[in-house]
Image (cartoon, coloured by chain):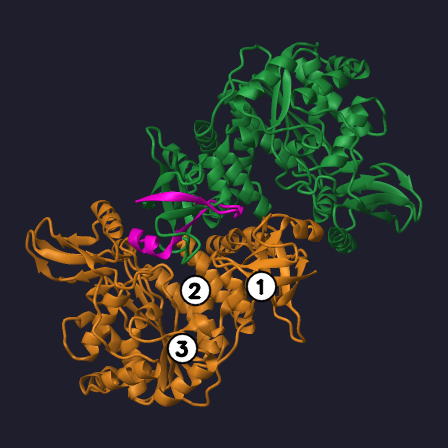
Chain colours: A green, B orange
Amino acid sequence: MELKIKFLKWSAGLPVVMLNQKTADKLGVHPKEKVLIKTISKKPKKMFAITDIVKKLVQSNEIGVSSEIKKSMDLIPRQRIKVNLASSTKSLEYIKKKMQKKELSEKEIGKIIEDIIANFLSEAEIALFVSSMYRNGTSMKETVYLIKAILKTGSKLTLKNKFIVDKHSIGGSAGRTTPIVVSICAAAGLIVPKTSSRAITSPAGTADAIETMAKVDFTMAQLKKIIQKTNACLVWGGGLGMVPADSKIIKIEKQLKIDPDAQLLASIMAKKLAVGSKYIIIHIPYGKTAKVSKVKALKLKKKFDFLGRYFHKKLKCVLIRNKGPLGRGIGPVLEMMDVVRVLERKGSCHLLEKRSLELAGELFELTGKAKKGKGIEMAKEILDSKKALKKFKQILKAQKGRVRKLKPGKFKRDFFSPKAGKIMEIDNKRINALAQRAGCPTDKSAGIYLYRQVGNHIKRHEKIFTLYAESKSRINEAVKFYKKNNPIILK
Amino acid sequence: MELKIKFLKWSAGLPVVMLNQKTADKLGVHPKEKVLIKTISKKPKKMFAITDIVKKLVQSNEIGVSSEIKKSMDLIPRQRIKVNLASSTKSLEYIKKKMQKKELSEKEIGKIIEDIIANFLSEAEIALFVSSMYRNGTSMKETVYLIKAILKTGSKLTLKNKFIVDKHSIGGSAGRTTPIVVSICAAAGLIVPKTSSRAITSPAGTADAIETMAKVDFTMAQLKKIIQKTNACLVWGGGLGMVPADSKIIKIEKQLKIDPDAQLLASIMAKKLAVGSKYIIIHIPYGKTAKVSKVKALKLKKKFDFLGRYFHKKLKCVLIRNKGPLGRGIGPVLEMMDVVRVLERKGSCHLLEKRSLELAGELFELTGKAKKGKGIEMAKEILDSKKALKKFKQILKAQKGRVRKLKPGKFKRDFFSPKAGKIMEIDNKRINALAQRAGCPTDKSAGIYLYRQVGNHIKRHEKIFTLYAESKSRINEAVKFYKKNNPIILK
């Protein structure tokens, strides 16, 4: 059936269409069922959408579409599109197979990923897939299939250079090493096409942080220009359409606050492969309150090593013990302020600086730019000479931004230590959750500034951190959470 | 914050509110996050809703609410309500505990159920709960907690009578024994406050079928009157608010097409307890294409027996081997036509009749109305005397309906056997899926009419069944499915 597009000015967060009751009856579609919409052209764009049925809002010759559909199908008002009842799919069966601990074939994983991209699977169904992978684990074979499926459904960046490098932290503790490492490496002539995600389970992703000073959402063509100009980029991967399946899965992982191994591995590897990286450093912080334990970190290392060999990449995992946030800030704006402090050589973020130098050093050694054991030295020279700062400014400029003075949220509350002692650890999970209660990552200027770090001694009633938010209700939410979950562990 | 209600004429299928961007900023709420809405009164009604953020559709002093919220909170236009950022909850943590195969406490299960009812958990989160129960199993302790939690959050029916009985089939094969069993038992003076569900994974639930001839959605007070008048009822349980948590969970199970044991047990037992049944027959059909295998049926029986003892009920499980649909019809209208045929003594549905007599007979023996081994005889007498038909008519009348001539869907397609042979089995899963492709259960007159049943011999090219639908596209969908999934197994 052909219908005329009508835009509905609301963002449902989901691809939703509205049909008039009469149209729905004719199509035989029920509320909440899926329809297939298709543009009328030689190379039609296709998409599945969930149907809402209304009596008045749209006429019987119209179809109302939510802004998500308008954007992803690039539609114009009154345009005519084809609408049909969606045929059934096998992917729910495959997901259930995984649920029953059976191994999926390349074809089956491919179909699931394809259906996720085409919106054929509902959030509840994707949740089932994510939780099955999480609960039942996945073989390395399945992980490889997942990577290939994610890659196949996306687009690739093609750069001609021997020294395309990448660095990735699996996350879990606050602090942005990425902008520092990228700036140091690019200043030394390495090519660093760094695409980052927004926060999944953390208060800030690198893309969230960079966005406080520059644009992060570019097309593939724009991206190439930025890299040609600066050797590097610091962009949001989601907007490039390189790994669209990954973005959809991550949305559900955010809701469920889980991140299965296979998806973590696939998500990282697919991104590295899509940008054509040849040398890859994977930073795996481990510890009691880090994302993974030491045992888990070693297991992940083994899997990454396998994938590196499988895809013919020079890949090295760097396992480092973690006892808390790397910088003083937690949250997009506050973490970005730390990055600038380090690049401007203004001190006070020793751990963030140390870690960044270690990771840049590893890349220098992996590529052979520095001799074994001399990588950190080389990185420090570049940082001290402010060549990294210069490079960072160049990248931001290419991304339509600049280093500017940032301000944390206008609502704030100071927190004081109830007793004296030495800070043994800052619980990553709690401090991250606290920053999230304050509004991170959506509220970019929300977050936490730590006056003291792990290893410091503090007095009774000493100010230990300030919490920032963009609204009073968020401050109250955070205070309520803090009372039950103090993240500062003293001895 | 206080805001004025504005109704949005759309059914989102979810409790959704729309806030103006300014209001959202003030509250500190992000798109897709939850707010707590509360009426202003001495006994405020509370509900969590998902937030959509718009620029124009609602003003900054307004809150747009979807029809689900309007209905469940009983709101009027321009009414003022309180809106606040929703506090965090522990239930997602508890769900993850279950995911990790740990046993949940009474308090934890109670909290999950409470949050499901208050809309605090998203569909993806409920999916995680359902799949964790499905995958990891649940102890009898947890099942009891689940039953108690579902009961606690609903309302109860209180009838004073010694002989309150109930019959339940776990489902899996088409054919409505319930209306026949209820009519026979009520005609014999038993009290049968039968509440049924709509279809979960099948083409028709008893409520879907009864609705083709009478109303099924009543208040508790109306229900009592119906039972006082007729000894029985045949209503939809979901509308009574007896087990609201169950209804929400079932909605997700429908999407995922899974039904975990604990939820199946809890769903059935909570309903029986809520209506105060003292004698309960649980019909468990088993077989190759039934819902459960014989082994699984025996396991379920053990669990039901435990729950019967735990809650001090006279409960008996009746395990019967199943090889296909009981009647000739599949789908609400077509199954209801079978029911009427049996009650009117018009033959042609031998298996449906036989099964109904067996189940009614078991209830007569369980209550002591008939001597051991004489139940079926007593049931047959009542059916043959047309007392059951009279009772059925009385119940329908009390439910504002009557026995009327029904018509299957106006679009139809005949199917012929490709070869001669004996029908060994009719695959329940395939024939149910076929009826669903045709539009069941939403399209009540869609479905299948079988000219031949299990055990019959058929000739080559003989007409074997007719498929009915309410739209042409549904017929096409079904034909497509049939080509790959012929449900008729010949020898």
Residue placed most toward the observer, B232 or A265: B232
Tell me if residue A190 comes above or below residue B302 in the rendering: above
Residue A139, position in %: x, y?
A: 47, 35
Marks 3 and 1 in Cβ contact (< 8 Å): no
Residue A92 part of the magenta segment: no
Q: Answer with left or right where residue A12 lies relative to residue A227.
A: left
Structural distance between the alpha carbons of marks 2 and 3 = 16 Å
Residue placed most toward the observer, B344 or B4: B4
SS category of the residue bearing label 1: loop
Q: Do labels 2 and 3 share a chain?
A: yes
Asked where in the image residue A120 lies, by quadrant, the reply is top left
Crowding near the residue tagged with mark 3, few <14, some 14–19, many ≥20 C-alpha atoms within 10 Å: many
Q: Would you name the residue on which mark 1 appears?
A: B118
Residue A451, position in %: x, y?
A: 86, 39
Q: Would you name the residue on which mark 2 appears?
A: B264
- Which of marks 3 and 2 precedes in the sequence? 2
Q: Residue at image x 61%, y 70%? A: B45
Q: Answer with left or right where residue B77 lies relative to residue B419.
A: right
Crowding near the residue tagged with mark 1, few <14, some 14–19, many ≥20 C-alpha atoms within 10 Å: some
Q: Residue at image x 82%, y 22%? A: A344
Q: Would you name the residue on which mark 3 appears?
A: B315
Type of amino acid at the residue the image marks with label 3: Leu
Structural distance between the alpha carbons of marks 2 and 1 = 22 Å
Residue range in magenta is A1-28
Q: Answer with left or right where residue A216 lies relative to residue B298.
A: right
Q: Mark 1 lies on which chain?
A: B
